[in-house]
Image (cartoon, coloured by chain):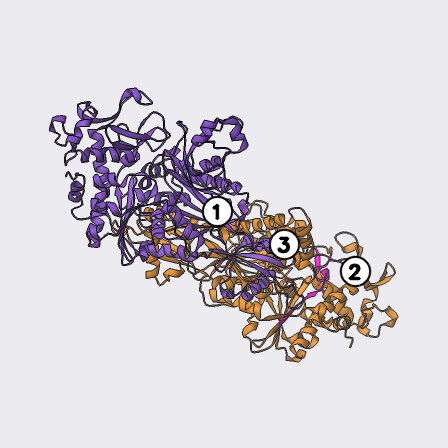
Chain colours: A purple, B orange
């Protein structure tokens, strides 16, 4: 099947859509909530969207409902318009657009070597003379297929099914093999289909990719908010909940397992396959999410020395974890590196192949805890920088998540301009806008090196004159007004306060110090770095120039920045499709030297320096 | 601890009793049901038994309750008398003596090499620098103990316990290892105690031996009737129930698992240890009992070609089978040979070490299906002979099990004499008495070669004259009266009819034909056999001379017969105490060449000949 790239604006949400799929389905896939008043029957005509780039031919019903002028402008009905080439689609103003989830992932492929194999075999008929047992004859069939008898094993549950399956299918069966273990037996030759799902369990969102394990083809993509958010928004609050609430760990685990099972159902239904055809899932997650998914108390991550309970890769029985796939199914857990550098980072490193790169690359996943890795095939160092929640809009006076109503980008043109996620009146600013806004203040000389907002009469840059009216006082501090009360959705002004800038300085200082320490540890300068790869949602939405201006990323690397999208999801897919890639995750996790910033010499002074701005 | 042999009469029940144990406990252990009206408090004085051999000194309470004459005769109270040397104890007439279970087993010891090991380790403290996970540090501790890192594995359930166990015990833990698998982790150094239980699951009875896995010492012996008897008395009716009744297999499995769990409880309570200290159980059983215990449909055993579903030895998680021992516990299943030559026979062969014997030995376990093995370290052949239920007293006009009221032995002296199990009036005859009775008829020339009861005037042996009155007619056939109606417990005569003799001829013919076929297959004559080992309950109670006279066992081997008691139980114990003995069961099962009697050339004529008697 062919796939096309569909970008939804505003919000820059990129989705790979199967040829012929309806925009409505693609929007669901992207997690873009949207009201289809008639349920998507093509009757109400309310799901107008604008196709601003790419070709679509209106269907009859669209021609009946829409005016000629609307049709000419590219207005279409999302429930009727099918995707047949790459599109950019503008969504109307609406508040329903709840969250942007990064689905598109950077591309990297690998040889397909499924972790499980289906082996059709013909078991010999039983004989009175030899009295060979069913299991013995099954072993002999597998030995004929090249398996080593001494290594073959199975479970009681398989042994219980075996006599009936063998006899019911007149001795022709299919063994589902995980290495030398008979994980399942099925009647007849069932080898034609074997599906798997790769998951990226984030603190906020969970994305799942349904894959054909033979061809590697992606059949559907599904996503949901992590239902654990009901128990705490971030990793620290989840750790606290797991350790201190009664049955906290169980509640969190059930929530994530329930969400995974729902996504499995949804992904299977979307392409009309059976859950039972799914034999394997892979899990990339941060260390805390990883532990909770397994039902392992993550408390050790929360207290010094912040070590995980478990770092090794695992292959587990899906049934043991109550994952509703084929009863022979396995769950493959990618390994962790440290308490705050988890399997999601390992997945990113697998995707970016730092372990085989000739050039030194810097990989950054920015979040409340930013994971940073620096390296090449020579060596890899990594750290976790406690940036705090500023990049996610928390602790910021007008801050909010990157959801509908959030200003996501700010432009200092003739006057101040900005874009709002979902269009409509702004409600606040998200992290990417905070970066843009502060970067502009730095470039205009409105901030000094220490981040202080200067008084208007202290400004020397003529370009700053234009923004005189934006420079205000708020609660006795300097502040920079982005949107007046009269034009916002809630009637309150949206601004950047001096305190907000302090928060951002802490956040970017932590990230930049992490990068600096890794470079020192590695023994290189910024110019030795050939590529900077920004992974994850925030990395995909931020303006790289802004990130460099504020010093989040060393400015000399601006031209080397690449956004690699949901590289953790891609890594999870790679591990699921290839046993050698899965094994490689262990090598990667072991190869990475973890650098503990808190105990790095002079870290506090490096961090202090990194909170400053570079003023031209 | 010292052990003494206690033989209870009538019934010849041999028990090995720990020094100092009360007769009451020993009788419980032997499965001898007996009323202790005051609950064994030493108050009612009703539990009088007679110590006919061996020394006991009456305690004060016995001196108060019993008369001097009684004390002199050896009368004692079972609830008060302790065992301090070998004893023969005569039980009073009573109907409560329900069943004799063979508990004493032939002696063979082996080097102790527990299947599971407890390894006390000190896990390194976590460090901020390395961020080594709990599991990684645990692995490193085990590697220091000589384990190979690449082979180490564990379960989710252990990983879930691990963080709290390690921290709760300040890094000092004990790993319970099964090969390279961490099966359990316990706080502190818990290596001092590790118990196991060896089971012999028979169709009728289940016997369990609680053993110290470090010293091999037997701590207690428990037994019970197999509760599956409620669903069918013999293997065939169980097979039918499992296959054809709704949830039949589940019902049978729950019954046996429930019985095993009760025995575990009982055995632990007897010696005041915790169920939680039991880490392993071993199971020897016939193939049908083996499959049912595992919840595997045994139907294939019931229909041609009668193959088992499973013959290999297994090591399973006790929790998976709902066996209530330590959660790290394992269940070791001895392997089967064929549908009707099961793990119990393998256990017998392990005990008798046929696989290492320089001499050729014949091992016979007589039952509804008699298992016969013949061999030496050169080779072993085995078969199952469908003897039918005659040896168990079924299908015999006056037949009954070897329970209270059964005539168990018959003596042709001046007049006919017999012994009755439990004393009292006779109610019927059990298999061993049937053998004696018929053997006497053969020796007296009362039967001809074909087994016909001759008329009195046809008898030529003067010794037969004495039994003129025993020769009666019953329902138009000849019959031999053992007990007149007036002296039996139910007021009906007890006799051997012509039909009973025919039944016995079928049964002994099947066994003898099995022995003949094995000798032919092996290429030897009876005189080449150096020992005949009779295993199991029936083999222990029968009179070897009678067995030879009727031709159940070749008469030339009479002097070579040895009773080896519950050799299946002993084999189960050996396998539990030594990993190399457990591995050896696989070699034995594979080494044995199964001979299918039904498809052996000329089997019918051999069987026909074997139903005859040899008349001097």
Query: Which of the 4 quarters of the picture holds residue B477?
Result: bottom right
Judging from the image, mark 2 belongs to the subunit labelled: B
Q: Residues within 10 Å of mark 3 (few under 14, many from 20)?
A: some
Question: Residue B75: within the magenta?
Answer: no
Q: Circle 2 is placed at which residue position?
A: B495
- How many residues crowd mark 2 within 10 Å: few (<14), some (14–19), many (20+)? many
Residue A393 appears at what percent x and percent y?
29, 33
Name the residue: 55% across, 43% down: A272
Taking depth in this image into account, of B143 and A465 the one nearest to the observer is: A465
Instruction: Give the residue at x 27% y 37%.
Output: A388
Magenta stretch, residue numbers: B381-410
Q: Are marks 2 and 1 in contact (CB under 8 Å)?
A: no
In this rendered view, identify the residue nearer to me: B404 or A346. Answer: A346
The kind of secondary structure element at disc 1 is loop
In this figure, which residue is indicated by the disc labeled 1? A2
Circle 3 is placed at which residue position? A164
Q: Whole-Å distance between the Cαs marked 1 and 3?
A: 42 Å
Which chain contains the residue that carries disc 3? A
Kindly identify which chain the residue marked by label 1 belongs to.
Answer: A
User: Which image quarter holds the C terminus of chain A?
Assistant: top left
Secondary structure of the residue carrying tag 3 is helix
SS for tag 2? strand
| Left or right: B76, with B385 as reference point | left
- With A428 as the anchor, is B295 left or right in this view? right
């Amino acid at each position: 099947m062919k796939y096309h790239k569909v970008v939804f604006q505003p919000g820059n949400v990129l989705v790979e859509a199967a040829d012929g799929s309806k925009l409505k389905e693609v929007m669901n896939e992207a997690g873009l909530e949207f009201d289809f008043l008639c349920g998507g029957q093509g009757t109400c005509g309310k799901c107008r969207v604008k196709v601003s780039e790419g070709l679509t031919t209106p269907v009859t019903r669209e021609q009946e409902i829409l005016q000629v002028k609307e049709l000419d402008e590219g207005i279409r009905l999302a429930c009727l318009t099918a995707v047949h080439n790459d599109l950019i689609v503008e969504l109307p103003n609406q508040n329903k657009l709840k969250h942007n989830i990064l689905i598109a992932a950077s591309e990297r492929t690998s040889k397909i070597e499924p972790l499980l194999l289906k082996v059709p075999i013909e078991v010999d008929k039983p004989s009175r003379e030899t009295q060979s047992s069913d299991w013995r004859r099954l072993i002999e069939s597998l030995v004929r297929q090249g398996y080593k008898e001494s290594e073959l094993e199975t479970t009681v549950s398989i042994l219980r099914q075996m006599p009936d399956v063998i006899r019911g299918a007149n001795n022709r069966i299919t063994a589902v093999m995980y290495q030398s273990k008979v994980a399942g037996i099925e009647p007849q030759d069932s080898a034609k289909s074997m599906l798997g799902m790769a998951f990226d369990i984030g603190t906020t969102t969970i994305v799942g990719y349904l894959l054909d394990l033979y061809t590697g083809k992606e059949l559907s993509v599904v996503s949901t908010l992590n239902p654990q958010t009901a128990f705490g928004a971030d990793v620290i609050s989840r750790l606290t909940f797991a350790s201190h609430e009664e049955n906290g760990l169980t509640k969190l685990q059930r929530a994530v397992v329930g969400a995974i099972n729902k996504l499995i159902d949804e992904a299977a239904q979307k392409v009309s396959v059976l859950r039972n055809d799914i034999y394997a899932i892979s899990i990339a997650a941060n260390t805390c999410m990883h532990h909770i998914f397994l039902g392992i108390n993550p408390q050790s991550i929360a207290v010094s020395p912040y070590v995980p309970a478990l770092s090794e890769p695992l292959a587990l029985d899906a049934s043991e974890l109550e994952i509703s796939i084929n009863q022979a199914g396995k769950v493959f857990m990618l390994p962790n590196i440290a308490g705050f550098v988890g399997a999601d980072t390992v997945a990113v490193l697998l995707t970016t192949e730092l372990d085989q790169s000739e050039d030194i690359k810097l990989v950054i996943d920015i979040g409340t805890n930013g994971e940073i890795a620096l390296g090449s095939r020579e060596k890899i160092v990594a750290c976790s920088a406690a940036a705090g929640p500023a990049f996610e809009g928390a602790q910021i006076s007008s801050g909010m998540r990157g959801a509908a109503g959030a200003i996501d980008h700010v432009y200092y043109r003739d006057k101040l301009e900005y874009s709002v996620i979902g269009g409509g009146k702004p409600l606040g600013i998200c992290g990417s806008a905070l970066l843009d806004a502060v970067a502009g203040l730095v470039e205009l000389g409105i901030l000094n090196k220490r981040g202080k907002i200067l008084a208007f009469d202290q400004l020397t840059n003529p370009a700053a004159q234009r923004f005189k009216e934006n420079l205000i006082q708020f609660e006795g501090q300097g502040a920079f007004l982005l949107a007046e009360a009269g034009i916002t959705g809630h009637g309150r002004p949206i601004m950047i306060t001096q305190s907000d800038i302090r928060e951002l300085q802490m956040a970017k200082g932590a990230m930049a110090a992490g990068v600096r320490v890794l470079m020192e540890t590695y023994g290189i300068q910024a110019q030795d770095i050939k590529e900077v790869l920004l992974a994850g949602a925030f990395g995909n939405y931020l303006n790289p120039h802004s990130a460099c201006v504020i010093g989040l990323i060393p400015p000399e690397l601006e031209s080397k920045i690449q956004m690699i999208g949901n590289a953790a999801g891609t890594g999870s897919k790679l591990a699921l499709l290839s046993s050698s890639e899965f094994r490689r995750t262990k090598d990667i996790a072991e190869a990475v030297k973890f650098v503990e910033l808190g105990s790095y010499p002079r870290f506090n002074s490096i961090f202090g320096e990194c909170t400053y701005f570079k003023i031209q």
